[in-house]
Image: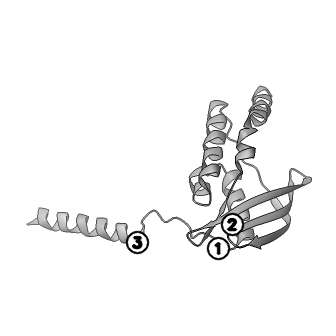
Amino acid sequence: MKRDHLLFFFFSWLIICTFTNCQNDPPLPKEPAAVVEQWQVWINKNNFEQARRLSTENTKEWIDWVNQVLNEGNITEETTSIFRNIDCKVDGDDATCFCQIEEVGETFADTFFLIKEKNQWLINIPETELESSGTLDSLFQILQEE
């Protein structure tokens, strides 16, 4: 009898978790600027699984590559990005966000491309950027040597 109660409790818990998503993932932002900021926070903290939630397939490929390079180089440092300005231009299901970002006391311009899929804005790193990852490989090698 006691075993039946335990099995009932276990299966009830399993069903509840299935329908309520027991992973406790934070809700995803819905506006392009908020998506850019949240995605960058997760990337900076090496929280690649969460960043994948706000990423297209191209971007997931880039994240996997960055994760691999960091793991191979045993690099665990986290960075902080302060967005000084974000200006997003939306055109249908495409958005481009022009940003002024401060990292380690330096301010620079960056551009994020987004695509709306299933009512969610996602960071989209274009194919051309993925193809130039050979340049990024050499930058990571320099970082590893330091």
Whichever of callouts 3 and 2 sits on the residue coming sooner in the sequence is 3
Res. 37 image quadrant: bottom right
Report the residue marked by disc 1.
30
Q: Secondary structure at mark 2?
A: helix
Determine the residue positioned at 42% across, 65% down.
22
The crowd level at tag 1 (other Cα within 10 Å; few <14, some 14-19, many 20+) is: few
Report the residue marked by disc 2.
35
Count the marks: how many?
3
> Residue 139: x and y, percent?
80, 34
> Residue 70: x and y, percent?
66, 37
Instruction: Inspect the image, locate mark 3, and give the three-letter code of the amino acid beneath it.
Output: Thr
| Quarter the N terminus occupies | bottom left
Instruction: Inspect the image, locate mark 1, and give the three-letter code of the amino acid beneath it.
Output: Lys
Determine the residue positioned at 78% across, 26% down.
145
Res. 90 image quadrant: bottom right
Q: Camera-side residue: 118 or 52?
A: 118
The crowd level at tag 3 (other Cα within 10 Å; few <14, some 14-19, many 20+) is: few
> Residue 30: x and y, percent?
64, 73
The crowd level at tag 2 (other Cα within 10 Å; few <14, some 14-19, many 20+) is: many
